[in-house]
Amino acid sequence: PRSRGLGDVYKRQILIIMTTFIIGQSVTDQDSISSEEESATESSHNLYIMFDQERGNTDHIATGAEYSFSLIGDWGSLQDTEFSTSLAGNYASLSDEPYALDGNFHTQFDLWANMGLSPFFFYDYSFDRSLGLINRHNIAVGAKKKLGRVFSISYAIMYEMEEYDSTDVFPRHSLRPKVKFVLNDGAAVIDFRTFYKPRVDDMNEYLWENELRISLATLYELLSIDFSFNHSFNSRYDENDVLKPEDEWDYDWKNDLAKPTYYKSTDYSVSLGLSFSM
């Protein structure tokens, strides 16, 4: 018999608590440019690892990892400039049948990162089995504008190559408003951003992504409580019924057969965890 569908697994999961270990490293180098000016750079490394396994009546495994690196500072005449890169991946299976396999790589260069106007360049690569996305490449240039202390907005033009059943190459807009509150000297951080990404040649086909991050400090200096919520919408699956491969169909236990399953346009994820910084 086939394994249970994902819906059965999610029904028995009320809360997913993940522990995130963040390994942080900060390096500062100072060089004298003149008798009155100095330049400094700071780097940081972050590593996240997750593993969950069940055996017996339920055979389930979920793994994930994420690494990020950033370098920010004054690079000669390029003041307050940031380079960052990150990569992540997830895999999950139920009764030895994979139901999640995704990954992404991102690298970005921001000129005058924390100033009023910041031009940037980035490259993205991603794939996601659950969405039927074989791969997606993005090369983009754009700029970010700060509007006050908590609000900023950015725009980029992206040249995208994506592959589902076939490969398509086209330009895409990317508009991103962002609101960030830092309270009590960093004891509480609330960060919300939304991305609207329509195709240039067809505004009715778009991606919409929302990210909310809340971090609360505790009495222990190195420990914080982190909450995150992610929402994504793909108009590709909103009005068109796109059938998943047969080996990914849900199983109807009442009638003892697999039932045709279609890709959904909307995905949500919620996590609550602890972060340790060292």
Image (cartoon, rainbow, N blue to C red):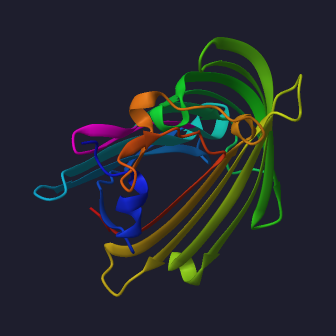
Seen in the picture, residue 61 relative to 136 is either above or below; the reply is below
State the count of labels. 0
Task: Give the extent of the magenta segment.
Answer: 83-100
Is 235 left, or right, of 23 in this rendering? right
**Residue drawn at (18%, 51%), measured in percent from left and top?**
59
The residue lying furthest to the left in this view is 56
Is 3 left, or right, of 68 in this rendering? left
Q: The N terminus is located in which quarter? A: top left
User: Residue 200, image x and y in percent?
Assistant: 87, 26
Is 208 left, or right, of 11 in this rendering? right
User: Residue 109, image x and y in percent?
Assistant: 61, 32
User: Residue 272, image x and y in percent?
Assistant: 41, 70
**Residue drawn at (75%, 39%), measured in percent from left and top?**
235
**Residue drawn at (67%, 63%), measured in percent from left and top?**
192
Closest to the observer: 94 or 135?
94
Closest to the observer: 234 or 252?
252
User: Residue 140, image x and y in percent?
Assistant: 71, 26
Q: Main secondary structure of the magenta part?
A: strand
Closest to the observer: 209 or 177?
209
Q: The C terminus is located in which quarter? A: bottom left
In the rendered structure, does residue 37 fall within the stretch colored magenta? Answer: no
Is 183 left, or right, of 103 in this rendering? right
- Quarter residue 74 falls in: top right
- Residue 100 seen by the camera: yes
- Quarter residue 11 falls in: bottom left
- Residue 273 seen by the camera: no
The residue lying furthest to the front in this view is 255
**Residue drawn at (35%, 70%), measured in percent from left and top?**
12
